[in-house]
Image (cartoon, rainbow, N blue to C red):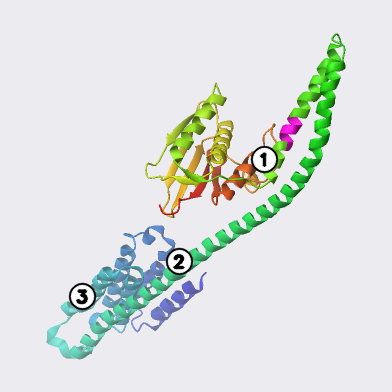
Amino acid sequence: MAAQDLVWLLFFSALALASPFHDVPSVVCIVALALFQLAEPRIAVFRTERGKLLPITIKLILCWLVLGYTAAINSSYYPILMLPVVSAATTTGPLATTMFTALACVAYVSFLGFVDWSELSDYLVIWEELLLRIIFLPVVGYLTYQLAKANRAEAQRYQAVAEELAAANQHLREAEDAVRRSERLAALGQLTAGLAHELRNPLGTIRASAEVLQKQLPAGNELAQEMAAYIASDVDRANSLVGRFLEFARPLALHRAPTELHGLLDRVVQEFERMTPAPTVTVYKNYDPAVRPVEVDAEWMERVVFNLILNAAQASPVGAVVTLRTRRLGGQETEIAVIDRGSGVAPEHRESIFNPFFTTKKEGVGLGLAIVAKIVSEHGGRLEFDSEPGRGSVFRVLLPAVTGQ
């Protein structure tokens, strides 16, 4: 039981025990009012915008019955009418508070209709006291409403501050993650660059030796010729991999220029369709005509979008649609979004997908998204994503607008 419930129980128990009447109807009304006051917070319909007027009305009726069974206009329980007034002031607006305050006053004054005017001297209430009792209700209603209004404003202010703090904490966590990722990338880049340079020389020697061996072998030794070809092929593959390592490790040489974004994206889509003669997905273009030129290195940015479309296609079922969307955002940023309805990213992989050498594919070394993230970062932009397993992913490239636009 909550402390508030205990207070209400003690209050209504004292009302029932202190009653000078001790008749069944008055006690029943007080008990009914107590039970309703305890049950009200637990009834969901009373917390809706329209439903919150009903409990105030019920309280007003029960309070009127309590007064009616305890000497009516002369009842010592007249302050109980403050209960629906206070309830209205703390849960509704000024109009409803005024309405219920007026109804409470009318409910009390209505007992004058039961006064036997021929025996007026038997009634303790005089007109001045009656006026004082009625005045208390609107005063209490007004003051309570002002206090509740101030509390609501303060609560909203605290809520806004809490939301700002939550957003700041989220940005701080994202910044910390970005710094840690940058530190890891820097360390891995240095290691990769050194390792790649060390590997290239022996790979070149192996490739040249395989070519010489292939020329010196007798024409009829097909097995040896095939093995020499395998050596050359695998060396080429390793050399290509080393090239990608170096590409990831070394700083990019960007040649930025104002670029018409939609033309750039059209070229990427054409290249994707050319390199996949039997495409498994359809690329749907959703371009925002308000998008202005962006200052990018067109060649590198084409590679970013191509990789994102390729990843989306590989994650999507055959015949699916991959959406390529552009938008101009309010913060003077331009968004390029690649949207798929594929397998999505598993929750345990969300923190790792931009890390180098992380991949869930059977083939590949996990440098694609790492290089994409690096290219976007070098352009002063951000790479973000949202994903839900089984329902697809949205990768967003956010680029700053050209200065002066």
Residue 164, can we see it? yes
Name the disc covering residue 367, or none.
Answer: 1
Q: Which residue is mark 3?
A: 106
Of 235 and 113, nearer the camera is 235
Report helix, strand or loop for mark 2.
helix
Residue 102, quarter of picture: bottom left
In the depicted structure, whether residue 302 falls above or below residue 335: above
Q: Which residues are magenta?
A: 237-242
**Residue type, numbered disc 3:** Val
**In the image, what residue type sits under mark 1?**
Leu
Residue position marked by numbered label 2 in the rendering = 160
Decide which of 204, 98 is in the foreground and name it.
204
Query: Of label 2 and label 3, which has the lower sequence position?
Result: 3
- The amino acid type found where label 2 is placed reads Ala
- Foreground mark, 3 or 1, reads 1
Camera-side residue: 227 or 123? 227
Q: Nearer the viewer, mark 2 or mark 3?
A: 2
Q: Position of residue 57 (x, y in %)?
A: 29, 67
Q: Residue furthest top?
A: 220
Sequence-first disc among 3 and 1 = 3
Q: Position of 349 compared to 126: left or right? A: right
Expressed as whole percent of the image width and height from the top left, the position of residue 63 reads: 31, 74
Residue displayed at 40% across by 74% down: 151
User: What distance separates the C-alpha of mark 2 from that of mark 3?
Assistant: 41 Å
N-term mark: 1 or 2: 2
Spatial distance from mark 3 to mark 1, Cα to Cα? 78 Å
Q: Residues within 10 Å of mark 3 (few under 14, many from 20)?
A: few
**Residue 204 place in picture, x, y as percent:** 80, 31
Asked if the stretch drawn in magenta spans residue 241, the answer is yes
Q: Residue at x 44, y 40 (%)?
A: 260
Whether the magenta-drawn stretch holds residue 61 is answered as no
Q: Find residue 135 and report its image quarter.
A: bottom left
